[in-house]
Image (tube, rainbow, N blue to C red):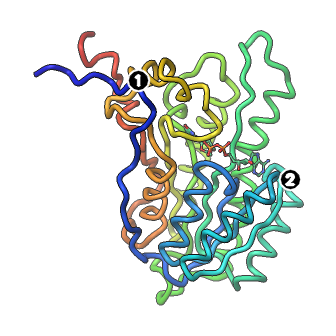
Amino acid sequence: MNAPSAPTSPSSGAPPLTIPRTLAGQKALVTGANSGIGRAVAIALGQAGADVVVNYIVGEPAAEAVVQEVRRAGVRSFAYQADVSSEEQVDAMFARACAEFGTLDILVNNAGLQRDAPFASMTLAQWNTVIGVNLTGQFLCARAAIREFLRRGVVPSVSCAAGKIICMSSVHQEIPWGGHPNYASSKGGIKLMMESLAQEVAPHHIRVNGIAPGAIRTPINTSAWQTPEAYARLMTLVPYARIGEPEDIARAAVWLASDLSDYVVGTTLFVDGGMTLYPGFATGG
Ligand code: NAD
């Protein structure tokens, strides 16, 4: 059988699907939810029946647009500006979420950024910014969520778990990435933070898991997919032969947040079109 040729235009997409209402009555907070993956996750959680806090740091109009989209599913939603790397702002955000919605059942730790540079010229500021937002930000938000989950415990009519946390990682928690050592370190750190936390709080029926996206079409990585040449190069890394869409990640997040995945604890779900399958070995090695 001939190998299919990689698509040369970035026109492929996730199939249109209806999200089942598996999260009815639950309260969710999504960080970095006014763009890309976070935006799609917030909308999908709303379609699944959850009320959603849309966290953002800059771009209020985009955050308000996501809120409007979430509300179209008939659920409550509001936008909240907070820097996830600030302890004070994170704690104030969770206090507001619990005041508004009564409690919180789901945290999607999504906010993240890149500050790329070759190792020798990377500044301490570039290093600290990425670790501060991607890793410390997830710690601060997870800690605030865990405190609320422990306080409230399981409410069987809502969910069989006392709370769910989904940590947005990356295939770069596994795949080294030259030129991006701060980003790869932050994602490797997320993996072990997520697993350590999952182990610690599982006896309280709190489930903590991760999602490792591959190449997803969002503003964080436009240079990797915007031209046909870049897209063709990217496809050499993706056995499934299409770029991932934010909705591909959102559907995985809905499942991990729902009771359908109740026995899934401390796992990273790779949603990457096979990127971690060493595609270079498909025809040799
Ligand atoms: P994006 O740039 O579209 O979204 C990132 C979001 O994080 C934005 O809303 C941004 O404003 C927010 N953010 C940044 N700093 C923040 C801070 N200090 N406080 C609060 N919010 C902040 O990019 P994306 O691709 O949607 O990325 C979302 C997550 O997915 C990130 O953690 C990223 O590392 C991860 N990821 C993305 C890809 C991909 O291919 N797009 C692949 C693997 C992992």
As shown in the figure, which amino acid type bears the numbered disc 1? Leu
Front residue of this view, candidates 204 and 230: 230
Left or right of 279? Residue 174 is: right
- Residue 13's quadrant in the figure? top left
Q: Residue at x 41, y 68 (%)?
A: 19
Left or right of 205? Residue 121 is: right
Residue 59 on image: x %, y %? 80, 53
Say which quadrant the C terminus sits in.
Answer: top left
Residue 55 on image: x %, y %? 74, 61
Residue 93 on image: x %, y %? 80, 67
Front residue of this view, candidates 248 and 222: 222
Looking at mark 2, is its residue's CB closer than 8 Å to ligand 1?
yes
Residue 161 on image: x %, y %? 49, 75
Q: Residue at x 47, y 25 (%)?
A: 231
Q: CA distance from mark 2 to mark 1?
A: 36 Å
Q: Is residue 55 above or below residue 228?
A: below
Q: Residue at x 33, y 22 (%)?
A: 279
Binning the other alpha carbons within 10 Å of mark 1 as few (below 14), some (14 to 19) or many (20 upward) gives: many
Say which quadrant the N terminus sits in.
Answer: top left
- Residue 7's quadrant in the figure? top left
Residue on which the image places disc 2: 86
**Which structural element holds mark 2?**
loop
Front residue of this view, candidates 265 and 98: 98
* Residue 237: assigned label: 1
Left or right of 114? Residue 196 is: left
Binning the other alpha carbons within 10 Å of mark 2 as few (below 14), some (14 to 19) or many (20 upward) gives: some
As shown in the figure, which amino acid type bears the numbered disc 2? Ser
Splitting the image into four quadrants, where does ligand 1 fall? top right
**Which structural element holds mark 1?**
loop
Label whose residue precedes the other's in the sequence (2 or 1): 2
